[in-house]
Image: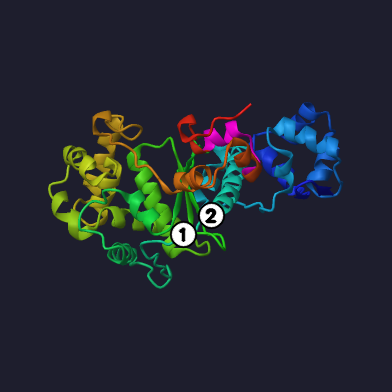
Amino acid sequence: MALRNGIFRPEMVGLRRRMVGLSQAELQAATGISQGLISKIEQGLKEPNEEHLNKFAAALNCLPSFFSQAEREYGPPISAHPMYRKKASVGQKVLDKVIAELSVRLGHARVLLQSVDMEPELPLPEYDSDEFAGRIEEVASMVRRAWYMPHGPVRSLVEYVERAGILVIFTEMESARIDGASYRVAGMPPVIFLNKNMPADRMRFSMAHELGHIVMHRIPSPDMEQQADEFAAAFLMPKEDIAPELSGFSLAKAAQLKPYWKVSMGALIVRAKTIGKIDQGTYSWLWRQMAINGYRTKEPAVLDFAPEKATLAAALIANLTDNMGYGPQDLEQALHLTYSELAAMYDLRPAMGLRRVK
């Protein structure tokens, strides 16, 4: 079916339906269109008419052009292991909702990137995880060297990641218990999605974990999650730098080191064990103490530090609004969602000059 802005894409109806968390039966209730017809439309077996599309757009709170956009639908990232691990306790509908939003955001990123020429300041190395199996610490060290990073803690991880041309986007993934996900799509820079509700220490570790996937994993592998964790620990806490500080390690020392290294107490305990500063008995005892004090659920608030803020995604939006004169309706037409939803997704504010003109 030809639409005003292109050719109807049946998969986009199901994508948007999952993104807003509706089943086909619930969409039937909202539109009066039978579930059987909805199913056939989503499968490409039946052509919708204009009335159907307008009803879908109204019920799913998007522009009718959403169903004819040129972007494709993306499935789960290769680093989706937390999604599958939590599947039994979370539920498929919640996971589908998150994956659908990531897909839509990837499409938005591609649109936003079309109007800029990105020139990364730093190289983005790639290493074969099979070749470096058992030597992940070496990979982390080589990336730090490639980025001319000084010894010691990483003061602003997101700054380095963005300078290497990686797009970092914060989104809502708490309901699915997902910390992060990453995509490498042809024709686009790598994209890291992070759960915006995480504590800052966990957010940094998740960002480093996803960086590990981008650097080492082009295809899924059985050991990829463990390797990404090893990379994150070594990247944020290089052995030669942190080892002297882990001597005489205790829970009190973990609390002391957390604000300086900007990692969790739990990550410091694991790191101390990994590099041989504590034995298995001490390691187990420390985790029991963490549990007794409630720190496995929430580490002491007095040790919290401010989360890092990504700037590249906001700069891409600002390029449209500030440099190219896009108003709210222009953004709606470019990204196929209502301005109110876009404002919530990308933290757009009236101060940016994006107030809707009625």
Q: Residue at x 77, y 48 (%)?
A: 10
Helix, strand or loop at mark 1: loop
Circle number at residue 205: none
First in sequence: mark 2 vs mark 1? 2
**Magenta residue check for 94:** no
The residue depicted at 37 percent of the width and 57 percent of the height is 163
Q: Position of residue 4 (x, y in %)?
A: 79, 46
Amino acid type, label 1: Met
What residue would you read off at disc 2? Answer: 113
Q: What stretch of residues is rendered in magenta? A: 335-345
Proximity of marks 2 and 1: CB atoms separated by less than 8 Å? yes
Helix or strand or loop: what does disc 2 sit on? helix
| Residue type at tag 2 | Leu
Residue 118 badge: 1
Determine which quarter of the picture holds residue 309: top left
Q: CA distance from mark 2 to mark 1?
A: 8 Å
> Looking at the picture, does residue 226 appear above or below residue 293?
below
Closer to the camera in the image, 4 or 74: 4
Q: Position of residue 264 (x, y in %)?
A: 29, 42
Q: Is residue 181 above or below residue 201?
A: below
Q: Mostly what secondary structure, the magenta segment?
A: helix
Image quarter (top left, top right, bottom left or bottom right) of the C terminus: top right
Report x, y in % for residue 35.
82, 35
Q: Quadrant of residue 226?
A: bottom left
